Image (cartoon, rainbow, N blue to C red):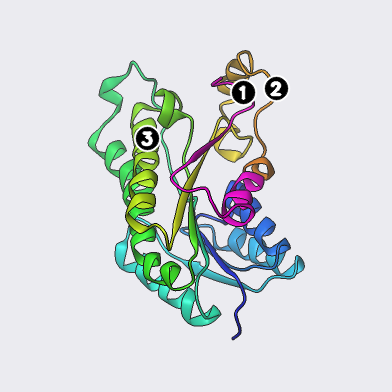
Amino acid sequence: MGRERVALVTGSATGIGRAVAWRFASFGFAVTVNYSKSRSEAEETADGVRERGGEALVIQADVADDTAVRAMVERTAEEFGGLDVLVNNAATTFFVAHHDLEGLTDQVWDEILDVNLKGTFFACRAAMPYLKARKGNIVNIASVAGMAGSGSSIACAASKGGVITMTKSLAKAFAPEVRVNAVAPGPVQTRWLADHQDMVEQAMKSTPLKRPASADDIADVTLFLANGTTLMTGQVLVADGGRTI
């Protein structure tokens, strides 16, 4: 296969990941759609990639499984001829009130850190040789929770803070061949928050633009970091309607 630009988007069956996959396809990328459990929804994302003119590959892999992540990256490179962009979007959380320290069980900590932080690292590590070969880049989906200590739980905020720090570390370690940046959304209107609209409404009271982000809003910022700039690295772009001004 020729020198088609290729993006791998983890956790792209729904929500932000789906919006990112579709946006990249609209700009001429072939896209690997990754999912952990939602195969039918991942296939719908892949159909949308093809409708927008991109080739699509659907791969099941739990990002917390290093072996599975390495196999996913290798298959992507084999099928499409290389890799230009890695978007680390796969994430999980538990809604635990910040004052409920006993609610942060070992199981909560382990699952959140395994997926959100270690999973992001595993994907970056597996993809780095392929990205270096094509002078590609990484966009990590972090969160303003990782900057402000807010969000669904202390554990989730800590994991996203780790993603932000890791973004800076990797940007230093792999420049100039590979750029590494992050997006830090505020509340995003996806199914994650469907049962927590009270949190969204409370956040909007201190948000100048008075609306949560849509998945498309975050896809816009992700595409810009991956495809709209060549000088930015180690940066975290906040997309929260001005709430953290």
Three-letter code, disc 3:
Gly
Residue designated by label 2: 209
Magenta stretch: give its range. Answer: 219-245
In this picture, residue 95 sits left or right of residue 118: right
Q: Give how far across and how far down residue 147 sits, in percent.
A: 42, 28
Quarter of the image with the N terminus in it: bottom right
For the residue carrying disc 3, how many other residues have a C-alpha within 10 Å: few (<14), some (14-19), or many (20+)?
many
Q: State how far apart marks 1 and 2 are (Cα).
A: 7 Å
Using the image, tell me which numbered label, if any, was put on residue 161. Answer: 3
Using the image, tell me which numbered label, if any, was put on residue 242. Answer: 1
218 or 131, which lies in front? 131
Picture quadrant where residue 18 is located: bottom right
Q: State how far apart marks 1 and 3 are (Cα).
A: 19 Å
For the residue carrying disc 2, how many other residues have a C-alpha within 10 Å: few (<14), some (14-19), or many (20+)?
few
- Find out whether the residues at labels 1 and 2 contact each other: C-beta distance under 8 Å: yes
In the rendered image, residue 244 lying in the magenta stretch gets the answer: yes
Please report the residue visible at 73 percent of the width from the left and 62 percent of the height from the top.
26
In the rendered image, residue 22 lying in the magenta stretch gets the answer: no
Q: Earlier in the sequence, mark 1 or mark 3?
A: 3
Q: Give how far across and how far down residue 177 sits, in percent.
A: 43, 63
In this picture, residue 54 sits left or right of residue 151: right
Three-letter code, disc 2:
Leu
Whether residue 53 is visible to the viewer of this picture, yes or no, is: yes
